Image: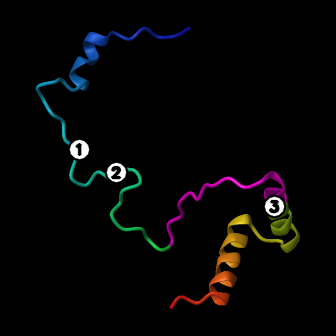
Amino acid sequence: MSKTIDLNKMSSLLASKEAVVKPAEDAKQRGHSGKERQDETVNLSFKVPAQVRKRFKLAAIHAGITQNELVQRMLAAWEAQHPTR
């Protein structure tokens, strides 16, 4: 059975048009920390053909490493072959 909520009692929690509620100064905005820590992980999302995805997953499995580790190793190898100027 679901509870009924009296919205009139909750009205003090809602912002009104006249009163602007600012977040606390130390409140972190999701995804906007200003500076990324080196150990912080973030999502990397893009589409690839299904066969590439399958090959990628199998490559990680056969190497005994995570997909994350495989991406990092692939990038390191590519950077070694293509040094920046």
- Specify start and end residues of the magenta stretch as a single range: 39-54
Residue 37 falls inside the magenta stretch: no
Density class for disc 2 (Cα within 10 Å; few <14, some 14-19, many ≥20) is: few
Pointer 1: what residue?
23
Across and down, in percent, residue 5 comes to 38, 11
Residue 50 falls inside the magenta stretch: yes
- Depth order, front residue of 71/69: 71
Q: Label 2 amino acid? A: Gln
Residue 40 relative to residue 72: left or right: left
Q: Which label lies toward us, 3 or 1? A: 3
Q: Which mark is residue 57?
A: 3
Residue shown at 65% from the left, 77% from the top = 75
- The quarter of the rendered structure image containing the N terminus is top right
Magenta span: helix, strand or loop, mainly?
Answer: loop
Q: Up-down: is 67 above or below 18?
A: below
Which badge, 3 or 2, is on the more N-terminal residue? 2
Pointer 2: what residue?
29
Residue 29 relative to residue 19: left or right: right
Q: Distance between the residues labelled 1 and 2?
A: 9 Å
**Element under disc 1:** loop
Please identify the quarter of the rendering in which residue 43 is found.
bottom right
Q: Label 3 amino acid? A: Lys
